[in-house]
Image (cartoon, rainbow, N blue to C red):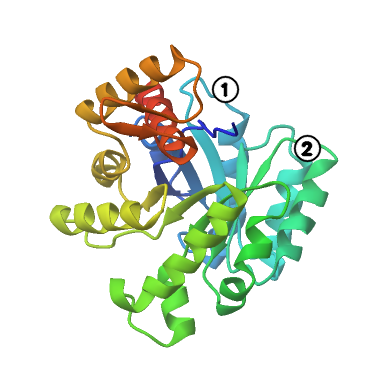
Amino acid sequence: MDIDSTPPRRSFLYVPAARPERFAKAMTSGADMVCVDLEDAVASDAKEAGRKASIAFFAEANTGGVERLVRINSIRTAEGLADLYAFAQADSAPDGILLPKVKSADEAEIALDVLAVKHPDVQIHVQLETVEALEAAFVIANTPGVASLVFGGMDMAAGLRVEPVWDALLYARQRLVHAAATAKIDLLDMPFFGLDDEAGLKREAENAQKIGFTGKTCIHPKQVGIVSAAFSPSAAEIARARDLIKKYEAQDQAFVVIDGVILEAPVLQRLYRILAIADRIGA
């Protein structure tokens, strides 16, 4: 039985590369992933300084178990090529590089090839925010070395000529859910920009979880707890999963009814993922 028990990346926090004094706080925010942002969060005249600060950050030991990423500029731009070259040549590298404004799988392959000489273990995360990427989502998701898809809803809305609201972007979200699911990789939703609207953040995160997203990006540390909770099972769900798995593993049938629950591959897949998340959060 092919069971994927890899815990999903639930919360992803952006921190501006131009504000290195915030890096340490981001690492203690509780996010599963921290992404230093060299793209939208950094002015043109501060790109080089942000690049140097980012490289210095990734040279520091990572003792917290938090996945560290950098969002470079689009590799279709001079700044993006400079970013990619700088990280390819640096002595230390992030765990992953987030590619924005991607239009095809070729960009992920190019980035992987450039990094492979010195940093073959760096993963690529792809931000899907163009209409071309939406069309190519399945190919991009299944490109070897791509570890997750990240939904860039604001740019996608502009490209689709719609407002950046849930209903208008539901088609795009569901297409990415399908693509990520076929590749068995994580899928992170766009940020929620209402920093003082906790109820709205909770509602959007829960809706994203219901339709198949594995996590959500955040633009402030105070959003991380709400997002992580939305993509985490409750204590009751964890206890129930442990009990059912224990009973299932104590017998030898592939298809069995235990405590009124039909236990077969798709049900077991969900239960094992619940336990994987429980292990990640220490529940």
From the viewer's perspective, is the residue at label 1 or at label 2 nearer?
2
Image point 33% across, 22% down: which residue? 244
State left or right for residue 70 relative to residue 228: right
Q: Quadrant of residue 161?
A: bottom left
Q: Which percent across, then down, holds residue 153?
A: 42, 69
Residue 244 lies, with reference to residue 147, above or below; the image says above
Image point 59% across, 54% down: which residue? 182
Image point 76% across, 45% down: which residue? 88
Q: Quadrant of residue 236?
A: top left
Labelled disc at residue 61:
1
Quarter of the figure with the C terminus: top left
Quarter of the figure with the N terminus: top right
State left or right for residue 162 relative to residue 77: left
Residue type highlighted by circle 2:
Pro
Q: Secondary structure at mark 2?
A: loop
Nearer to the camera, 180 or 90 = 180
Q: Which percent across, then down, holds residue 169?
A: 38, 74
Q: Which percent across, then down, holds residue 143?
A: 71, 55
Any part of residue 166 in sight: yes
Q: Secondary structure at mark 1?
A: loop
Nearer to the camera, 202 or 31 = 202
Residue type highlighted by circle 1:
Ala
Residue 185 lies, with reference to residue 65, above or below; the image says below
Structural crowding at the residue carrying mark 2, measured as other residues with C-alpha within 10 Å and reported as few (<14), some (14–19) or many (≥20): few
State left or right for residue 197 relative to residue 265: left
Pick out the residue farthest to the bottom.
161
Pick out the residue farthest to the top.
250
Q: Earlier in the sequence, mark 1 or mark 2?
A: 1
Q: Which residue is mark 2?
A: 120
Structural crowding at the residue carrying mark 1, measured as other residues with C-alpha within 10 Å and reported as few (<14), some (14–19) or many (≥20): few
Give me the C-alpha separation between circle 1 and circle 2. Answer: 19 Å
Labelled disc at residue 167:
none
